[in-house]
């Protein structure tokens, strides 16, 4: 299966590399292919620039957002939340039609200092997941994986035997079933995947970012996740 | 030590009863003493009306918000988040001066249906904890316990051997140290208490409500909490 990953950041890189290792054909979509290839600086967290990363991940194809949307049978949104709608609008209508978009982005607002808050128009009574479903009604948005560091998204067994939670939500049951299969290939146990219901539940999972960021800042590692104890 | 609990709801009742069982002298504060005593109907969740509860919890004193503030050496805010400022404004300035207010309330907004969202003015870039500290600078606000069902607040050992998380935050270190002592008497282990820092971190813990409410709705019990797996 061909999968398109929107976004060249650390999250997009991590998802794309995992998908390649699982045998999927992968294209990363970006706004400007030449600019993406030219980013070779390591960021403040020690992550490779995309251009450098791509050289050592040569099985990953690179294209524009529009090319990636046409390429992928399944799409993953790993763009920054504030630019996700614009990125996906680069796709032709028919290239999103009937397709699943796994939305792992968060609408973070860095304009008010650290830790970031959520973009006001996409918080509390709304969410990025809902906004994407509204803007792209021809696609099936499934929100998942957005509540943790990307290293854990594709390797949940790294901590606690993999016994911690990953939420999913979306309006289409078949789409969620298909996404569960991909998540299981990432290493997620069925009992760790909690389906909250329709896409409005993105309000809940995106609201986890403010506490996630603060726990990260307090314990000093992003390699943690929450578990539901009952 | 004398402790005042603001709020006659299920949370206030639970905290007050626990404090009495621990040997504290307790007064519950309310807007209207006669009205509070007359509430005898059981609510939709099966909780006793306050008047009925009070009859079987006769060691608990009842007074106005102002009387409770004068009475308590330590105060607990268990009012509904939208009315907390008004409730505490009933207190004389000097009756809050230098006192710790343990804020366990959440700024829930039920006006847009279920599950509730957060009151917009007290969400994302602000919080109830911060608002209380701003409105009552003479007091030391310590936010804690607001991320779980009240039954667990006072009996964390009910699930998972008590190994799940309770955040606290506030601007005054001595106040947080004193609150930790009370929390330990409630049964909290020191390693389960995560100090996030100053009161702005209330934005993080209050933001947990949207996901808490959805997990509750999905798994069908409020007797759960989150644990940090790392």
Image (cartoon, coloured by chain):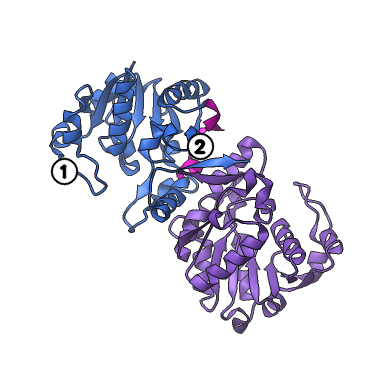
Chain colours: A blue, B purple
Q: Nearer the viewer, residue A130 or B136?
A: B136
- Tell me what residue is drawn at x 41 percent, y 48 percent: A121
Q: Nearer the viewer, residue A90 or B225?
A: B225
Instruction: Tell me if residue B82 can be seen.
Output: yes
Of mark 2 and mark 1, the one earlier in the sequence is: 1
Q: Given the image, what chain letter belongs to the residue carrying mark 1?
A: A
Query: From the viewer's perspective, is residue A59 above or below residue A7?
Result: above
Where residue B48 appears, as percent x and y from the top left, is 80, 54
Q: Residues within 10 Å of mark 1 (few under 14, many from 20)?
A: few
- Tell me what residue is drawn at x 13 percent, y 33 percent: A34
Q: Nearer the viewer, residue A195 or A30?
A: A195
Q: Residue furthest right?
A: B55
- Tell me what residue is drawn at x 51 percent, y 71 percent: B133
**Tags 2 and 1 in contact by the CB under 8 Å rule?**
no
In what element is the residue under mark 1? loop
> Residue B67 falls in which quadrant of the image?
bottom right
Where residue B61 appears, as percent x and y from the top left, is 79, 72
Where residue B173 appears, as percent x and y from the top left, is 49, 71
Please report the bounds of the magenta region as a residue range: A190-207
Q: CA distance from mark 2 to mark 1?
A: 33 Å
Q: Given the image, what chain letter belongs to the residue carrying mark 2?
A: A
Q: Which residue is mark 2?
A: A164
**Magenta stretch: dominant secondary structure:** helix
Query: From the viewer's perspective, is residue B93 above or below residue A125?
Result: below
Left or right of B90, for residue A214: left
Q: Is residue B113 magenta?
A: no
Q: Which mark is residue B134?
A: none
Mark closer to the observer (2, 1): 2
Considering the image in quadrants, where does the N terminus of chain A appear? top left
Q: Which mark is residue A41?
A: 1
């Amino acid at each position: 299966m061909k999968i398109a990953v929107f976004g060249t950041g650390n999250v997009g890189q991590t998802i794309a590399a995992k998908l390649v290792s699982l045998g999927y054909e992968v294209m990363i979509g970006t706004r400007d292919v030449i600019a993406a290839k030219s980013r070779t600086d390591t960021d403040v967290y020690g992550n490779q620039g995309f251009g450098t990363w791509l050289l050592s991940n040569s099985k990953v194809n690179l294209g524009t957002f529009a090319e990636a949307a046409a390429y992928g049978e399944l799409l993953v949104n790993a763009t920054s939340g504030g630019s996700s709608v614009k990125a996906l609008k680069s796709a032709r209508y028919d290239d999103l039609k009937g397709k699943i978009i796994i939305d792992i982005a968060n609408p973070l607002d860095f304009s008010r200092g650290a830790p970031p808050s959520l973009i006001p128009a996409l918080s509390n009574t709304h969410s990025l997941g809902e906004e994407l479903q509204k803007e792209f009604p021809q696609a099936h948005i499934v929100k998942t994986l957005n509540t943790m560091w990307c290293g854990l998204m594709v390797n949940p067994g790294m901590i606690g035997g993999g016994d911690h939670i990953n939420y999913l939500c979306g309006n289409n049951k078949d789409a969620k079933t298909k996404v569960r299969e991909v998540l299981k290939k990432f290493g997620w146990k069925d009992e760790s995947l909690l389906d909250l219901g329709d896409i409005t539940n993105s309000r809940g999972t995106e609201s986890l970012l403010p506490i996630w960021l603060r726990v990260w800042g307090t314990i000093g590692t992003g390699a943690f996740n929450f578990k539901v104890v009952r």
